Amino acid sequence: ETGTLKRSIVAFNANATELASAEANGVITVWSLPDGQLQRHWRAHTGSVHGLILLPDDRVLSASYDGSLALWTGAGELLRRERTPAPITDAAVDVTDDIIVTGHTDGRVRRWRISDLQLIESVHPHRGGVRAVAYHAPTQRYASSGHDGAVYVWRQGEPVRALTAPPTDARDLAFTPDGARLYGASWFKVFRWDLADGALTIQNTEHRGIITSIDMSADGRRLATISRETDSAVQILDTATGTPLVRFQSHELCGGYVQLSPGERFLATTSDDATVRVWDLAEMSAGVP
């Protein structure tokens, strides 16, 4: 998977009572929360899974570098598999809009209906593979970053617009809740674009490696982050300054993925050390060890 990290990812269900992870070998595993008991697992793909969601009707949606989207029952039985024109490198999902947005190695960003996995739209913003995609449902705004170093935003039916190019590739993307700004992750730093004019602000952080994954809090004031290479730190940053508000125990090996649960009770991370870690933020805020 040239140029693409073989990472594990995680996804919470809507009420944060279950957590799913997808390994680099294509296996999906589901645990109950908060006890962390194994519920079920199955081989879903032949490549890394770069998109995963536990749907409200107990189905599971996955998107893989093997070039397929798949819908599963909660027990892991295949309902539908749709082959994609190129391997999937990242995905963003909005259940309310029935949309999954996928980035691909061919430089295209594709939009699909979750309900039947039918392709709705294909846009070709990048020269080379797509690194990350994001979708902001209230404004119906899309964003993508690529191996070409470019970052784009657009709305359905409108021209693709280039933002100020960052000094290094944006490895992950996240909109603020109001859709006014876009954040990106890179070596040591966090990028912030004002979408009114495309202006770029670069924030220093305490990370000492590539920030590979970010997740925005519901109030837009905090950014969960994880990094790799010379660093495996897990932090929650102040979005205004990039300074850490919370530092978590680092993974033993390179960090992979980070996600806040709905309601933000939990934070989950993955790593090359083959662990999935879950922190109970409610207990931490209450001072419970």
Image (tube, helix red, strand yellow):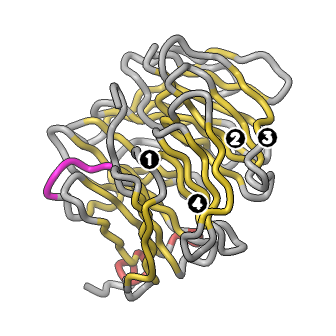
From what the image shows, is residue 19 above or below residue 4? below
Quadrant of the rendered image containing residue 179:
top right
User: Mark 4 or 2 closer to N-term?
Assistant: 4
Q: What's the CA distance linking mark 1 and mark 2? A: 16 Å
Residue in the picture at 32% in, 55% down: 235
Q: What's the CA distance linking mark 3 and mark 4? A: 21 Å
Q: What's the CA distance linking mark 4 and mark 2? A: 22 Å
Confirm or deny contact between disc 1 and disc 4 (CB under 8 A).
no
Identify the element where label 1 is drawn: strand
- Residue 234, how many percent across, how many down? 29, 55
Identify the element where label 3 is drawn: loop
User: Mark 2 or 3 closer to N-term?
Assistant: 3
Query: For the residues carrying marks 1 and 4, which lies nearer the camera in this image?
Result: 4
Tell whether 7 sits left or right of 228.
Answer: right
Which numbered tag is attached to residue 179?
2
Identify the residue position indicated by label 1 in the image: 214
User: Mark 1 or 4 closer to N-term?
Assistant: 4
User: Mark 1 or 2 closer to N-term?
Assistant: 2
Inspect the magenta stretch and tell me whether residue 1 lies in it. no
Residue in the picture at 57% in, 42% down: 68
From what the image shows, is residue 109 above or below residue 39? above
Predominant secondary structure, magenta span: loop
Q: Amino acid at mark 3?
A: Thr
Confirm or deny contact between disc 2 and disc 3 (CB under 8 A).
yes
Q: What's the CA distance linking mark 2 and mark 3? A: 7 Å
Which region shows up in magenta? 252-256
Q: Foreground: 206 or 58?
A: 58
Identify the residue position indicated by label 4 in the image: 53
Q: What's the CA distance linking mark 1 and mark 3? A: 20 Å
Which numbered tag is attached to residue 139?
3
Residue in the picture at 23% in, 60% down: 274
